[in-house]
Image (cartoon, grey):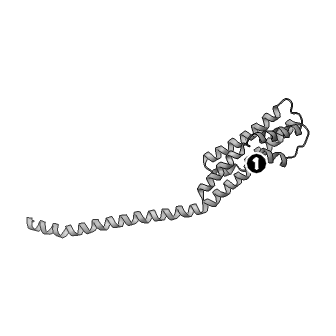
Amino acid sequence: MNQEQVFDFLFAILPAAIVGAVAFYFFHTYLKNEESRRRFLLLRENRKTALPLKLQAYERMALFLERISPGKLLFRIKPTSKEASLYANLLIANIEQEFEHNLAQQIYLTSECWDYIKTAKNATINLIRNAAAKENIETTDQLRDLILNNMIERQPPTDAALIFIKNEVKSLT
């Protein structure tokens, strides 16, 4: 094979190689864009179905916080005896039961929001325990009065968590 035949061969192959490289580039770019489009559509569809579940979880946790708010809890749970410690245990058991009932909602909440909710629950339980542990508190009426007076003086522990939930829901929608 002489040099002229090699050049003729290269001149014949070079345009085919260039066309092949350009075709490969466009095909590769098209496939990448198509994959991104499919991923976007799937993500949009997932968000469309996940958003109502997230909102429902936030709604349930807001309801939980409202139900364990000391003022509302005292009016909703009637004492079964006159003894303050038994009533305090009943209130705490009710809070724990409500919390366990809503435990699965943490899947849809941010970890920071879940921490706020747990802190509010624990602070409410501590408030009840501390009130019941006072020496001069013997009857349920005295316990209820002390807890309600604490709520008049200070903001309920559940309020901060409720505000946090409201802000998170605003950012979702």
Residue 107 position in % (x across, y down): 63, 51
Dot 1 amino acid type: Glu
Q: Secondary structure at mark 1?
A: helix
Q: Report if residue 108 is visible in the image.
A: no
Q: Which residue is at 65% across, 57% downward?
A: 55
Residue at x-position 63% and y-position 47%: 113
**Could you say which is closer to the camera, residue 107 or residue 71?**
71
Which residue is drawn at the image coordinates 72% and 40% (left, top)? 122
Position of 69 with respect to 33 (left or right) is right
* Viewer-closest of 100 and 165: 165
Q: Is residue 13 above or below residue 124?
A: below
* Residue 157, position as x, y percentages in the image: 72, 42
Where residue 43 appears, as percent x and y from the top left, is 53, 61
Residue at 61 percent of width and 59 percent of height: 51
Question: Which picture quadrant has residue 147?
Answer: top right
Q: Quadrant of the N terminus?
A: bottom left
Residue 61 vertical position relative to residue 133 in the rendered view, above or below? below
Residue closest to the far top: 135
User: Which quadrant is the C terminus positioned in?
Assistant: bottom right
- Camera sees residue 51: yes
Furthest-right residue in this view: 82
> Crowding at label 1, few (<14), some or many (≥20) Cα neighbours within 10 Å?
some
Q: How many marks?
A: 1
Q: Which residue is mark 1?
A: 98
